[in-house]
Amino acid sequence: MAAKLIDGKALAQQIRAEVSGRTQALKARGVQPALAIIMVGDDPASAVYTKHKVNDSTETGLAATLERYPATMAENELLARIRTLNEDPAVHGILVQLPLPKHMDAHKVIETISPAKDVDGFHVASAGALMVGQPGFWPCTPHGCMKMLESIGYDLRGKHAVVIGRSNIVGKPMAMMLLGKNATVTICHSATQDLKAMTLQADVIVAAVGKRNVLTADMVKPGAVVIDVGMNTNDEGKLCGDVDFAGVKEVAGWITPVPGGVGPMTRAMLLVNTLEAAERAAR
Ligand code: GUN
């Protein structure tokens, strides 16, 4: 294997330890950082994710509550609950788990969350703050990817980063974060005509498509840093990313595994954002 592994699991553990320390310091000042999680309906994956979020929080000293509502909940009821949480000084972060039932407008729901408590970083105000380089909350997945690049001491200045995928919560914010570090950024997507021609130029590749084998060894410049955001299942039913790991690891300089890469980092960054929200409120 040519590539060095960026161990997201180990880095996330380190970040969680830092969160624990800062949480203790805040608690010593009488502030208990708290995250309110709302789940509507009974999507099995959402049930697992929200449970992880609660457990991750309590393990690092953050208080977390999970409110579960039936899929029949009226949108107005949900908006009213969010507004109440917005006004509650004991709650620092609010997270509404997605997807929401079809009768709800997810955009409207997210926009109802106070930007000061938007620890997912999905609010338009959070996206705007990232765009103009002002303090706000960064979405957890791309933020975690940036921490991984930072952990290997990678200097992005003047480097070419290619992001594959243009979602509002990964691809687009990822590009803005890379740009903020003075990288040259190309965003590719399903309509990109010659993806390989783009990725072969890249010093850093972030694959965030949600499809297996989007990136293969022939598409990677030797020594490039490859970050795999994908979460797919392979033929054996095991978790795998967007990158053909076995092939690409022979060409890349650095690579993130799946599992044990971006996933644990996403979870850790939610804790960082929640703590940050509490620290800002206490200032
Ligand atoms: N559903 C899947 N991932 C996420 C996430 O990061 N935040 C929220 N709110 N919902 C999700």
Image: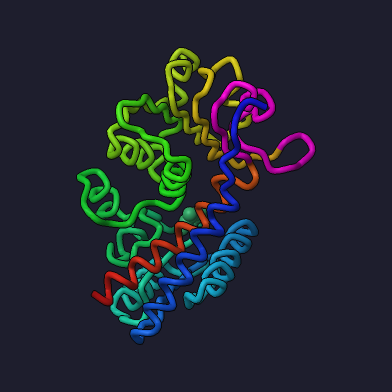
**Residues rendered magenta in the picture:** 234-257
Q: Quarter of the image holding residue 198?
A: top left
**Which quadrant would the C terminus be assigned to in this image?**
bottom left
x then y, percent, for residue 129: 23, 51
Q: Is residue 271 magenta?
A: no
* Residue 153 in sight in this render: yes
Q: How many marks are shown on the rendered structure?
A: 0
- Could you tell me which residue is drawn at 31 percent across and 64 percent down? 112
Side of 47 where 184 appears, left or right: left
Q: Nearer the viewer, residue 236 or 224?
A: 224
Q: Position of residue 241 (x, y in %)?
A: 62, 37
Which SS does the magenta portion mostly show?
A: loop
Q: Position of residue 16 (x, y in %)?
A: 51, 63
Q: Residue furthest right?
A: 236
Asked whether, in this view, residue 170 is left or right of residue 222, the answer is: left
Q: Reply above or below: 161 against 222.
A: below
Look at the picture and state if 25 lies above or below 215: below
Q: Is residue 152 above or below residue 59?
A: above
153 or 41: which is nearer to us? Answer: 153
Position of residue 216 measured from the top left corner of the image (x, y, whole percent): 60, 21
